[in-house]
């Protein structure tokens, strides 16, 4: 059976912001189709497409109203079927985003639940409960987006939503829910899709005692004791999904499980997920000690590694790395001060981090635009923000729109080649400088570095040995005779001997400059 995913590089397509074929301001399947060659030429093995299902878009499509169709602004089911075929013909696998923790409040099931009696079968597909006393929610749980995790329905019952009130949580103890998602998996697998990225995979089980709880974060809690994150019961569901996937050849699922690294292994294995994103790597910052220990802890899991630097929920790493250590990038978006940002340093480090990630064993997920060194658009006007976090946090957290701004394809022209004149989020005037068009003609560009690294990466293989080159340097050797060295310190270090395979910045003086990474070949 094909285990293509074990060392694959998967390119994340945030479809609404990727390419807009019909110029209505929203990226779509036609646009993605027109860029498949670009993705294939980059040298990746597959794509993961963020949710494209019919949705009121209260949370960027993570509020799904119909799991078996495509939103009409994005395309049609027929276009989706044609896309997967064409992607396969250019050598790309296609993963979809499965959103099993919650539906949209516009999903027919939830509409039916609201119209039904307390205690009805329709309500038991979700978590409806009576409050405590007069107008007090069943528990004190807080929503991830801010505010209470319960909303009062018209007849006095409350329903649970770990995210937005328009994203009611499904009850995974309900057999209808279990059966429905197995059917949804088969629906897409039968159409040739290669698997799924599973949204909030750590949230499917809820504490059946419905107790109050003071949230101190998963790190400080006994394992499995959080009322709605990382509970042991959720693995039952996963095992069923895995047996469905195993009926098909070469399919996979990758979990978005936001849990401490020592808990991640439970999600993985031959009867569980194939992979789970390594968010500890994303969060390690520019600190050699931290990065080394995340790499060591991750390798110790002994499973397929899944490295990631950016995604549609994180401040883009070209900006994160341009901020002083210790600054919380998400807060900084709102509070600044913005002079703290050093964009050149951010880009240098982003390029070096990419070489680090791509030299590690296992697979890597590349978020659209990171191959262009695209920074966060941190100064989006607040009246254009769409992320529910902005409102739910009472305007204290700006949210994730700044990493979702539509891609710059050309240096000039309407929406820098994205599509029509009026993209759903405004692009800054400097976006064209980062365009794929401009970078394709510049041998020293970030795009060309990604292409080169992705091509050369195919020569890398075998195990990893961490090499000690000083406290501020992350260095490791692959069994294929390649050495990856990243200088995270503030002074140059000697360049190790050997054949230079790829570099993230200028080299040639016999030293490796700060914020720079290289791959060296023929290392004995
Ligand atoms: C995941 C998604 C995020 C979404 C949330 C709720 O974390 O990546 O974008 O808001 O789930 O579905």
Image (tube, helix red, strand yellow):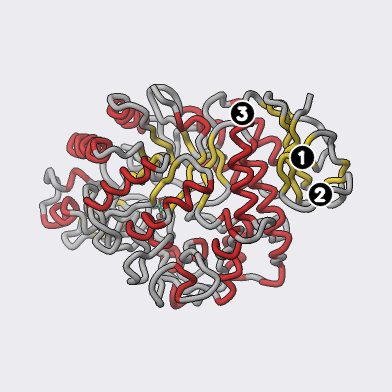
In the picture, the quarter occupied by the N terminus is: top left
Image coords of residue 72 (percent x, y): 24, 61
Determine which of the numbered discs, if any, sits on residue 240 in the image: none
Q: Secondary structure at mark 3?
A: helix
Residue at the spot of label 3:
299
Q: Secondary structure at mark 2?
A: loop
Residue 490 placement, left or right of 42: right
Q: How far apart, in angstroms, are the residues tagged by discs 2 and 1?
A: 9 Å
Which sits earlier in the primary sequence, circle 1 or circle 3?
3
Which sits earlier in the primary sequence, circle 3 or circle 2?
3
Residue at the spot of label 2:
507
Which sits earlier in the primary sequence, circle 2 or circle 1?
1
Q: How far apart, in angstroms, are the residues tagged by discs 1 and 3?
A: 26 Å
Residue 224 placement, left or right of 161: right
Residue 152 placement, left or right of 164: left
Determine which of the numbered discs, if any, sits on residue 500 in the image: 1
Q: How far apart, in angstroms, are the residues tagged by discs 3 and 2?
A: 30 Å
Q: Is residue 36 above or below residue 261?
A: below
- Eye-nearest disc, 1 or 3: 1
């Amino acid at each position: 059976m094909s285990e293509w995913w074990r060392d694959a590089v998967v390119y994340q397509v945030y479809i609404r912001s990727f390419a807009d074929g019909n110029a209505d301001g929203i990226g779509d399947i036609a646009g993605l189709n027109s860029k498949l060659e670009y993705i294939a030429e980059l040298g990746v093995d597959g794509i993961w497409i963020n949710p494209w299902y019919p949705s009121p878009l209260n949370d960027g499509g993570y509020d799904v109203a119909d799991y078996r169709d495509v939103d009409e602004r994005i395309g049609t089911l027929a276009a989706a079927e044609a896309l997967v075929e064409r992607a396969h013909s250019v050598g790309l696998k296609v993963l979809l985003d499965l959103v099993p923790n919650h539906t949209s409040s516009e999903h027919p099931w939830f509409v039916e639940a609201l119209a039904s009696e307390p205690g009805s079968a329709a309500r038991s597909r979700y978590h409806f409960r009576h409050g405590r006393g007069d107008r007090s929610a069943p528990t004190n749980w807080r929503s991830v987006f801010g505010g209470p995790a319960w909303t009062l329905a018209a007849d006095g019952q409350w329903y649970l939503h770990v995210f937005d009130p328009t994203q009611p949580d499904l009850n995974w103890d309900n057999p209808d829910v279990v059966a429905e998602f197995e059917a949804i998996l088969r629906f897409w697998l039968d159409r040739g899709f290669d698997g799924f990225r599973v949204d909030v995979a750590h949230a499917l089980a809820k504490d059946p005692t419905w107790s109050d709880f003071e949230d101190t974060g998963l790190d400080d809690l006994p394992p499995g004791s959080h009322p709605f994150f990382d509970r042991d019961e959720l693995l039952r569901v996963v095992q069923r999904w895995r047996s469905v996937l195993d009926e098909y050849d070469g399919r996979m699922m990758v979990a978005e499980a936001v849990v401490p690294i020592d808990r991640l292994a439970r999600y993985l294995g031959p009867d569980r997920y194939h992979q789970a994103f390594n968010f500890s790597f994303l969060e390690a910052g520019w600190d050699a000690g931290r990065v080394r220990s995340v790499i060591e802890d991750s390798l110790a899991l002994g499973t397929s590694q899944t490295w990631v630097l950016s995604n549609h929920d994180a401040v883009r790493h070209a900006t994160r790395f341009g901020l002083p250590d210790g600054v919380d990038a998400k807060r900084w978006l709102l509070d600044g001060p913005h002079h703290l940002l050093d964009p050149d340093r951010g880009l240098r480090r982003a390029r070096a981090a990419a070489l680090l990630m791509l030299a590690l064993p296992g697979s890597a997920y590349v978020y659209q635009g990171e191959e262009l060194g695209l920074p966060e658009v941190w100064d989006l006007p607040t009246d254009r923000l769409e992320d529910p976090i902005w409102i739910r946090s009472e305007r204290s957290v700006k949210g994730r729109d700044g990493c979702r701004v539509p891609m710059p394809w050309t240096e000039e022209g309407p929406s820098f080649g994205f599509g029509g004149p009026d993209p759903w989020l405004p692009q800054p005037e400097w976006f064209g400088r980062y365009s794929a068009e401009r970078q394709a003609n510049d041998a020293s560009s970030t795009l060309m570095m990604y292409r080169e690294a992705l091509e050369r990466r195919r020569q890398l293989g075998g195990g990893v040995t961490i090499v000690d080159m000083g406290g501020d340097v992350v260095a490791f050797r692959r069994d294929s005779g390649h050495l990856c060295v990243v200088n995270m310190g503030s002074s140059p270090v000697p360049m190790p001997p050997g054949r230079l395979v790829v570099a993230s910045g200028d080299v040639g003086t016999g030293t490796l400059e700060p914020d720079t990474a290289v791959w060296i070949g023929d290392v004995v």
